[in-house]
Amino acid sequence: MKQKVGDQLKENEVYRKMLKKEGRRCWTLEYSDSANYHMDILPSIVDSGYQTILEMAFSSNDLTDLNKLVIRITDKNRDDYFFENNHKLWLKCNPFGYGKWFSVQASLDLTKRITLGESIKPVPQYQKDKLPLQRVVQILKRHRDLMFNGDEDKPISIIITTLAARAYQKETSILEALLNVIERMHLFILEKFDPESGKMIKWIGNPVNAEENFADKWKEAPKKQINFYKWLEAVKADVRNALNQKDKGLHSVMESLKSPFGEKSVSLAFANYGEKQLQLRKAGGLKMAGITGMIGSVGKTSITQHTNFGAKKDQ
């Protein structure tokens, strides 16, 4: 099946020029080096009724039965790759289950959704403004791209996304979320005994497949692990440097973030930031964090509602 998909791509004049060398499980179309954009095409088989199961799964925030979203894919490194015709014996993969898990991690409760101007649907079909966790992941991946500039041993996106989602604590402020996420990401990198090597290895588990370790290549390529920790420390340093500008206002913080994180990603992340903070204050949910002094949804000190003239709002 995978070869047939590859043959179809090669027959197309446009796609043939974009097609990279066959991957272990997928084909990759490289759209533009300058844009740093590619598309992975993963040949797969699903059972009958899968579309209905998928729609039902994304109609709520329930994370039970995610295994029903499993698809079957080929893997050219498997011994049975060339002769196994029973797709139920092929490798399991659950991208939709992972997507559902991430959407729940990123979701906010009704009050916070309203203050952010988000749709109250559990998984809206179209979301004009990305949720804070989505923006944080976008910013982190852009920082990674700028720092490693195409290095094949750069931290992979699935590791950044998974650790960020686990570290996220439903902050509504993007700055607050970014700071807390990078300070907590390391807590979700575990160590497990590897019977093959007889050593302890780093383990970043797939939240929808307990048997899969997203950091499995770190064992074979130690530079990948070294680069991840090097990147994480660089992110922390760059964010702390930006936060040192907070006394000069949000604009100064944003300007400090643009160099290491990219102007476009920072501008998109903080679009309408002031308006959202105003909505949060009016809803009585604006607070000040004791350690950083950051204004957001988490903190011990509540920000009193007031008018633009400094007077306390009439009750």
Image (cartoon, helix red, strand yellow):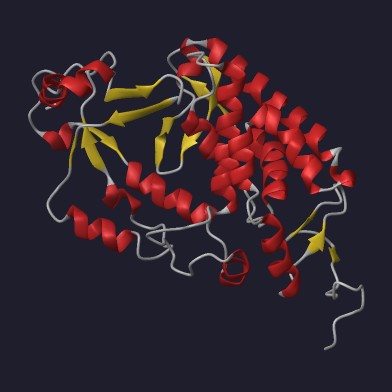
Q: Residue furthest bottom?
A: 315
50 lies left or right of 246: left
| Residue 76 x %, y % | 22, 18
Q: Residue at x 54, y 23 (%)?
A: 155
Q: Is 70 rendered above or below residue 104?
A: above
| Residue 67 x %, y % | 31, 49
196 lies left or right of 245: left
Evaluate whether residue 144 shows in this view.
Answer: yes
Q: Is 56 rendered above or below residue 161?
A: below
Q: Residue at x 69, y 28 (%)?
A: 259
Q: Tag count in the figure?
A: 0
- Of 188 and 297, the residue lying toward us: 297
- Of 106 and 92, the residue lying toward us: 106
Q: Residue furthest front?
A: 309
Evaluate whether residue 166 shows in this view.
Answer: no
Q: Residue at x 37, y 60 (%)?
A: 125
| Quarter of the figure with the C terminus | bottom right
| Residue 254 x %, y % | 73, 41
254 lies left or right of 292: left
| Residue 30 x %, y % | 34, 22
Q: For residue 142, what is the image quadrant?
A: top right
- Of 130 and 183, the residue lying toward us: 130
| Quarter of the figure with the N terminus | top left
Q: Residue at x 14, y 48 (%)?
A: 47
Q: Is 296 rendered above or below residue 182?
A: below
